[in-house]
Image (spheres, coloured by chain):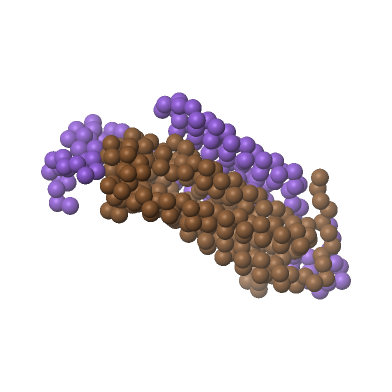
Amino acid sequence: MAHNESHAASASQELHHEPLPVKVYLGVFLGLLFLTFVTVWVAGFDFGEFNMIVAMAVAVTKASLVVLYFMNLKHDHDRLNGVIFLMGLFFLIVFIGPTMWDKVTRGEVDPQRGQAAELPAHGAAAQQPHPAEQPK
Amino acid sequence: MSTPTAAIPSNIKRHEVGHHFGNAEQEFSAAKLGFWIFLCTELLMFGGLFVAFIYYRTFLAETFLQAHRTLSKPLGVTNTVVLITSSFTMAMAIRSAMVNKQKQMMAFLWITLICATAFMVIKLGFEWPAKFSHHTLPGRFFDLHHASEAYPFLADVKSPAIFYSLYFMMTGLHGIHVLIGMGLILWLIIRGGRGEFYSGFYTPLEVTGLYWHFVDLVWIFLFPLFYLVG
């Protein structure tokens, strides 16, 4: 570790970090390009309902590579940064989860509105709206 | 393949820790922690839009499937590659500063800025003008008469305007982030040119890097949702 002893600044004034090897960044870069190719290639096939799941699986893998290596959460000395990020993810899941839960079960608790949630076609005459939705 | 840290060049402006910090490590950690908390607020802001996308998609699966065909897949792929490349060069710029290769750092920063510019040129110069000319626009600006001339299948699906509202809001907000990122990278180039970044101090690089990778992260999800699956 090169440190200029004659410099007035004490060791505590400067950082002394060991960077990750170049091959890690290069590997992640090539991995991301490869996964981009994979996701585009796979989109050419029709798996029906699973199209979204396959695309999201690849996206989550790419995102993990970026977060762990480019954003350095894997080797970060401050583990708290990772905890903060996981908390953000947790809140995002709380956000998405119950929203979709509501979407899926709305018809059971309110059959009328569960059906009325269908939106009218563009340009077509709007269907009779649910009474509760009239004062808009 | 660990590159040995070169000696700190003589033209470097040595860093002095802010008086409110105990040492360099504390200063660095505090900046990063603050930025990660900011990134969480960003995550939830984009998260809200992603929730809107998923929610509407469950009602309008056919609309989203048909409308996504009007987006240019080649341009989407190009922009993905451009953004991933810029994320890589950003990471390499930080690494170069850490091993005191200032010229290399400046080159990587310039490449990052050029990639960011390329992304915005493709977005604003090629993709969005096509949307404007076909009137496939958000909300009440959507014009089915014009849109169905180019894309007849849009006439057969419900509320395609909602897809374009989400498309413009989400890629627009992402685009604003890219523009802000370009400003930050330019700021790094100016400060780097003054010799302010080296192994002993690279906090602004590190924090801007986190921001830039986050912008990449958002695009990693936007790309398959809009361009591939719909």
| Residue positioned most to the right | A6
Query: As displayed, is residue A7 above or below residue A52?
Result: below
Q: Nearer the viewer, residue B203 or A118?
A: A118
Above or below, A65 against B117 in this view is: above
Residue at x-position 30% and y-position 54%: B141
Q: Position of residue B160 (x, y in %)?
A: 31, 43
Rendering coords of residue A26 (x, y %): 71, 44
Q: Is residue B55 left or right of residue A130?
A: right
Chain in purple (letter): A
Answer left or right for A102 relative to B171. left
Choose top left, top right, bottom left or bottom right for residue B201: bottom right
Q: Is residue B193 left or right of residue A88?
A: right
From this viewpoint, is residue B30 visible?
A: no
Q: Of A108 and B56, which appears nearest the observer? A: B56
Q: Residue B115: x, y in percent?
A: 61, 55
Q: Residue at x 27, y 47 (%)?
A: B145
Please give the letter of the chain rendered in brown.
B
The residue shown at (57%, 62%) is: B182
Q: Is residue B84 left or right of residue B151?
A: right
